Amino acid sequence: AELTAQGVSASGVLLDGTIVEALVEHAQSAGVDLTVMTTHGRSGFAPLRLGSVATAYLTRATAPVYLVRGAGTDAPPELPVGTLLCTLDGSPFAEAIIPHATTFAHATGLTMALLSVAVPHAMPMAPFGAETLLVDDSALELEEAGRRDYLVRIAALCPAGTTVHTVTDMSVTRAIVEEATRLSAGALALATHGRGGLKRMMLGSVADEVLRHAHSPVLVYRPS
């Protein structure tokens, strides 16, 4: 009723059953285009110990999910403004976020920006200790140029005004979060494999880490 009074077409439904399973079943049966929910952004063992509806839902959702970090206040969150930073790694899997990011950017008035992170190829210097590494500059230059050419090609398929950004960092997650901060991105967008439980902890997940460290809302899509 409160949303309707604000001019929003809204309806409510009360579901029975286990939270995540009930949400997934309803989303699929109703043909939901987008799920919006908040997340605590817990890290480490906290999600396993306390549980996380957002994380569990992501592992099963078949439509994009828009996650907003809970601010811990009663103040309503503002709509994202400025840039929608879309992260790509050159794979068709990651590119699956593009159509959803485009739709979301159009609906919210955001300008799309494409980001790809080049990770330096380090060669171990055994004589100087196992921890000593030497970056292969020539390989890094080729990778940076290749990633930029790739982003320019993808940007041509995106809305007019889409910008491209390449950064170099040993940590993909850190690079994404820092670039989002530098650009004052209103939101981020990326694809996820949707791994859950111990598998995610053992294999790692860029999307999972971004969700826990980014200050901006994140649009996530799990390709089937």
Image (tube, rainbow, N blue to C red):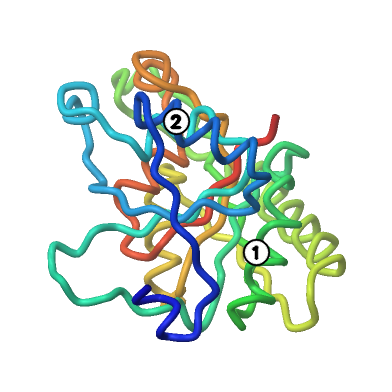
Q: 12 or 207, which is in the foreground?
A: 12
Disc 1 marks which residue? 114
- Which comes sooner in the sequence, label 1 or label 2? 2
Along the horizontal axis of the image, is 171 left or right of 92?
A: left
| Residue 171 percent across, percent down from the top left | 41, 43
* Distance of label 1 from label 2 (alpha carbons): 35 Å
Q: Residue at horizontal 42%, vertical 85%?
A: 6
Q: 8 or 104, which is in the foreground?
A: 8
Q: Residue at horizontal 34%, vertical 76%?
A: 2
What number is the disc on residue 22?
Answer: 2
- For label 1, the crowd category at 10 Å Cα-Cα, with few meaning under 14, some 14 to 19 and many 20 or more, is many
Residue 160, compared with residue 217, is above or below; it is: below
Residue 149, compared with residue 211, is above or below; it is: below
The C terminus lies in quadrant: top right
What number is the disc on residue 92?
Answer: none
Residue 138, compared with residue 122, is above or below; it is: below
Q: Residue at horizontal 23%, vertical 22%?
A: 48
Q: Comparing marks 1 and 2, which lies closer to the viewer?
A: 2
| Residue 141 percent across, percent down from the top left | 66, 52
| Residue 132 percent across, percent down from the top left | 33, 29
Q: Amino acid at mark 2?
A: Ala
Along the horizontal axis of the image, is 19 left or right of 24?
A: left
Q: Residue at horizontal 19%, vertical 64%?
A: 71
- Find out whether the residues at labels 1 and 2 contact each other: C-beta distance under 8 Å: no
User: Residue 53 is drawn in which quadrant?
Assistant: top left
User: Residue 43 is drawn in which quadrant?
Assistant: top left
Q: What is the count of numbered marks? A: 2
Q: Amino acid at mark 1?
A: Leu
Q: 84 or 170, which is in the foreground?
A: 84
